[in-house]
Image (tube, grey):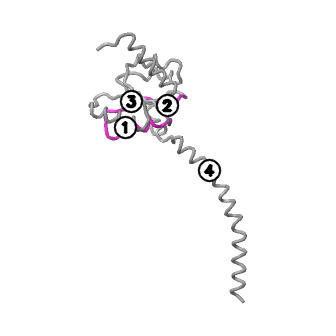
Amino acid sequence: MALGLAAKQAIVKEVNEVASNALSVAVAEYRGMEVAHMTQLRRQAREQGVYLKVIRNTLAKRAFVDTKFEDMDSALTGPLIYGFSIDAPGSAARLFKEFAKENKHLKVTALSIGSGLMGADKLDAVASLPTRDEALAKLLATFKAPVSKFVRTINEVPTKFVRVLSAIKDAK
């Protein structure tokens, strides 16, 4: 069923708002996927905080205007599903990568983290990006390591002194 102008404008506005707030977008071709698999993908996306949308490519091109994903125009061909990462930059890529292992019909065609269009060959790199919590944990561990090593080194001096006194006591 054809969409009216008002419906198309509403879709463009909705996708533009999501794209403006998204950290990254992954685009995959879903030709040949069954409805049950698509439903499963949507369920997983909701659980992982990924916004999924199947829209016409011409509407997507209009929706990406004035966002950091404007450069994706050349990759928007064929039946595509758009995955927008809202919380973590790698979540949509991670979702598509994991789902593509089980379903051969889902093929990632393009990715963008706001710094330019990337091909499907960069899927592993984008999917391995840490979440915000993981990045903060790594940063705090990096800050903590020198301090804890310094404390152990300072603590080693009195410990060695006590061991020497104990050795002298045992020798007498």
- Of badges 1 and 3, the one in the foreground is 1
Amino acid type shown at disc 4: Thr
Describe the element under mark 2 as helix, strand or loop: strand
Alpha-carbon distance for marks 3 and 4?
36 Å
Q: Residue 172 in the image: state x and y as whole percent.
A: 72, 89
Where is mark 2, residue-wise?
A: 24
Can you tell which of label 4 and label 1 is closer to the viewer? 1
Is label 4 in a helix, a strand or a loop?
helix
Crowding at mark 2 (Cα within 10 Å: few <14, some 14-19, many 20+): many
Under mark 3, the amino acid is Ala
The residues colored magenta run 88-114
Q: Is label 3 in a helix, a strand or a loop?
A: strand
Q: Is residue 165 left or right of residue 102?
A: right
Residue 142 has which mark? 4
Foreground label between 3 and 4:
4
Nearer the observer, disc 2 or disc 3?
2
Residue that numbered label 1 is attached to: 44
Task: Name the secondary structure under disc 1.
Answer: helix
At 50% from the left and 27% from the top, the residue drawn is 117
- The answer for how far apart the CA atoms under marks 2 and 3 are is 13 Å
Q: Is residue 42 above or below residue 3?
A: below
Query: Residue 100, labelled with which disc?
Result: none
Distance, label 1 to label 3, CA atoms, is 15 Å
Number of residues whose C-alpha sits closer than 10 Å to that of mark 1, classed few (under 14), some (14–19) or many (20 or more): some
Amino acid type, callout 1: Gln
Indicate which disc, 4 or 1, sits on the residue closer to the N terminus.
1
Which residue is found at the position 53% from the left and 28% from the top?
114
* Residue topped by disc 3: 28
Sequence-first disc among 4 and 2 = 2
Upstream in the sequence, badge 1 or badge 3? 3
Percent x, y for residue 13?
46, 18
